Image (tube, helix red, strand yellow):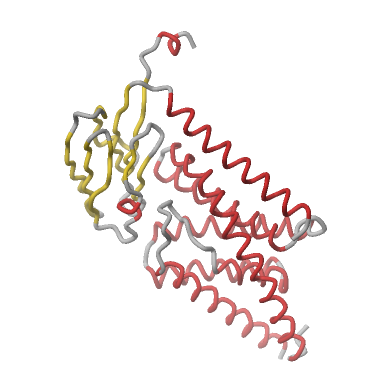
């Protein structure tokens, strides 16, 4: 372990913490949230995400199925027949910028946001 | 004779790397990020890069990804692992070849792990046509610090033992 190894480790920690902060920061200034389900790069469906919504969506592709629950402002892939089950193990997402990816089925569930403030229009 | 030994050694190392890849695919990681793995085969790849050089370790690596494709049978994960493997090997080669005065094997393998993750996320974002996947990257960088450290640390022992064996058979 040389001096430069330690510098590299500290640098990478710094970069990744900064990156996580940026992801969070981008997510925090939205007041409207959407759930987008994307299959094969094209939009499958889109819902407004708030606390009242309660939906169960079944996405069926020729590769398999994913069952997505939207409930209490949270989104989770409840069931899937993909081989690695990463989408199910990912758990609950609720903030803009978060996403669940099912690589085998090429399904993405992502939360996006938009802000209606005047501030954002003036950009 | 040298050529035969050469082939045998490469084949052995490839077999080890394939074994570790399959093993790694079987054990689940508690972290659910796409492609979050321990990087066990990278121990073999890094050791062979140090001992046998770039070309041979590239051969081992590419043959490994093809064999894993045949065993596991997942063409999509093959694309990810192929680009990740090639890109991380090139990065490790450059760091080891030109900056080995500064970085030990631990640093080299951390570079490799980071390059591997970057390539995989980039490939995933191209295939899925979605840039948001890059938001996984900071978390994966943190994970790759630990896995990279582990791999670099253990490669030291592998290289030590391999050198002993190679000295015994008078190969080098």
Q: Residue furthest right?
A: B101
Q: Is residue B104 above or below residue B47?
A: above
Q: Viewer-proximal residue, B171 or A67?
A: A67
Q: Viewer-proximal residue, B141 or B92?
A: B141
Left or right, residue B47 beside residue A102: right
Left or right, residue B127 beside residue A82: right
Horizontal and vertical percent position of residue B102: 80, 55
Q: Is residue B136 above or below residue B98?
A: above
Residue A50: quadrant of the picture: top left
Horizontal and vertical percent position of residue B9: 64, 83
Residue B69: quadrant of the picture: bottom left
Quarter of the image with the C terminus of chain B in it: bottom right
Horizontal and vertical percent position of residue B46: 65, 67
Q: Viewer-proximal residue, B134 or B29?
A: B29
Q: Is residue A47 above or below residue B24?
A: above
Q: Residue at x 21, y 37 (%)?
A: A71
Q: Residue at x 70, y 57 (%)?
A: B107
Q: Residue at x 45, y 70 (%)?
A: B68
Quarter of the image with the N terminus of chain B in it: bottom right
Left or right, residue A101 beside residue B164: left
Horizontal and vertical percent position of residue A122: 47, 8
Residue A36: quadrant of the picture: top left
Left or right, residue A42 beside residue B28: left
Q: Is residue A64 above or below residue A43?
A: below
Q: Viewer-proximal residue, B157 or B23?
A: B157
């Amino acid at each position: 372990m040389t001096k430069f190894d330690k510098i590299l480790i500290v640098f990478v920690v710094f970069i990744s913490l900064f990156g996580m902060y940026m992801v969070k920061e981008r997510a925090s200034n939205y007041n409207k949230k959407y759930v987008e389900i994307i299959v094969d790069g094209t939009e499958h469906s889109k819902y407004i995400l708030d606390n009242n919504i309660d939906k169960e969506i079944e996405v069926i592709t020729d590769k398999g199925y994913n069952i997505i629950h939207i409930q209490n402002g949270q989104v989770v892939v409840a069931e899937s027949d993909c081989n690695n089950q990463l989408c199910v193990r990912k758990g609950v997402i609720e903030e803009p910028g978060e996403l669940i990816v099912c690589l085998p089925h090429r399904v993405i569930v992502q939360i996006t946001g938009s802000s209606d403030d005047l501030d954002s229009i003036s950009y | 004779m040298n050529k035969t030994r050469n082939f045998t050694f490469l084949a052995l190392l490839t077999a080890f790397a394939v074994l570790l890849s399959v093993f790694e695919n079987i054990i689940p990681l508690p972290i659910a990020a796409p492609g979050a793995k321990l990087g066990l085969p990278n121990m073999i790849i890094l050791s062979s890069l140090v001992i046998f050089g770039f070309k041979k370790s590239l051969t081992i690596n590419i043959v490994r990804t093809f064999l894993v494709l045949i065993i596991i049978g997942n063409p999509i994960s093959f694309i990810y692992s192929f680009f990740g493997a090639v890109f991380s090997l090139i990065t490790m080669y450059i760091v080891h070849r030109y900056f080995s005065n500064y970085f030990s094997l631990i640093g080299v393998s951390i570079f490799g792990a980071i390059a591997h993750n970057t390539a995989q996320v980039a490939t995933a974002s191209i295939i899925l046509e979605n840039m948001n996947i890059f938001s996984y990257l900071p978390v994966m960088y943190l994970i790759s610090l630990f896995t990279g450290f582990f791999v670099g640390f253990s490669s030291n022992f592998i290289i030590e033992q391999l050198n002993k064996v190679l000295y015994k058979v008078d190969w080098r």
